[in-house]
Amino acid sequence: MIFVIDVGNTNTVFGVLDGEKFIAKGRLATISTHTSDDWAMKLHSFLQMNGIGKIDGAIISSVVPVMNRKLKKAIRTALGVDAVVVGPGVKTGLNIKIDNPAELGADLVVGAVAGINKYPCPMVIFDLGTATTASVIDKNKTYIGGVVMCGVITALNAISSNTAQLPQVDVSAPEKSICSNTVDCMRSGAVYGTAAVIDGLVERFEAELGEKPTVVVTGGLSTTILEHCKTDLIHDKDLLLDGLRIIYEKNCD
């Protein structure tokens, strides 16, 4: 069994797989001030809670660099294995054709690796988290670029914090897109607005690619948004964890 962990700016998602089958999955807030011992205790508790014994290996993907050393130490303490960290020198099998391949985030690499192994190309992968990202992979399975924009909750928090009369709201869809009160207006913008952005970007990507892409949506907010998109989408909530498994297998044969 292997332990896979994806560290995002807001949440850290992890799971245990036996082959391609998930045995257990969990999610914690990403708190970078926690020590390696804090994380070791959390991981140990997770394994105990799910009745999981021996772990054979582990792999980390992180967009929070300060977490890498802490998690490697925590995994060594709690799981008794040395973790692979996705980064330079790690085999991914992904062909990246952008201006500076080194600046491509580990999360985008991992998502793309999973995508090309699971779905037909060309492909667009939307990851809805702290930021909303789109990764575009051409028909030759080459990562050719994408889009980064403000995440749904990040945007809502920003306008609530920087305006005198706009409240904090949850991310949920109102009954109609045209709303008659402030809270529902904000919800409409967050949910229907993001769905419309996804539809619009897919249309533009398709024109530039010259053919219809497979569209995959993942990330913490994907369930809330995707049902309001007009585009034909595949919802894959475990895309990044699957990508970590695939990369681990490439590096531990």
Image (cartoon, rainbow, N blue to C red):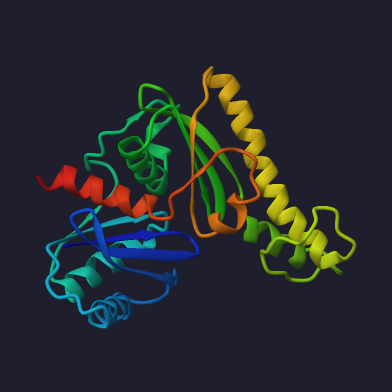
Going by the image, does 251 lie left or right of 114? left
Instruction: State which quarter of the image contains the N terminus.
Output: bottom left
Instruction: Estimate the x, y position of residue 79 in percent, counting from the top left.
Output: 17, 72
Count how many numbered circles sit on residues in the image. 0
Going by the image, does 198 lie left or right of 158? left
Instruction: Name the residue at 22% across, 39% down.
Output: 91
Instruction: Estimate the x, y position of residue 9 in percent, counting from the top left.
Output: 48, 60
Residue 148 versus residue 64 in the image, above or below: above
Residue 87 seen in the current view:
yes
Residue 91 versus residue 176 in the image, above or below: above
Quadrant position of residue 142: top left
Instruction: Name the residue at 64% across, 45% down.
Output: 229
Instruction: Estimate the x, y position of residue 244 in percent, counting from the top left.
Output: 28, 51
Task: Work out which residue is located at the far left of the displayed protein and give it.
Answer: 253
Instruction: Name the residue at 37% across, 47% down.
Output: 106
Instruction: Estimate the x, y position of residue 157 in percent, counting from the top left.
Output: 69, 64
Task: Work out which residue is located at the far right of the displayed protein and give it.
Answer: 180
Task: Please state which of residues 62 and 189 is positioned toward the viewer in this rendering.
Answer: 189
Quadrant position of residue 232: top right
Quadrant position of residue 203: top right
Residue 151 seen in the current view:
no
Task: Please state which of residues 105 and 94 is positioned toward the viewer in this rendering.
Answer: 94
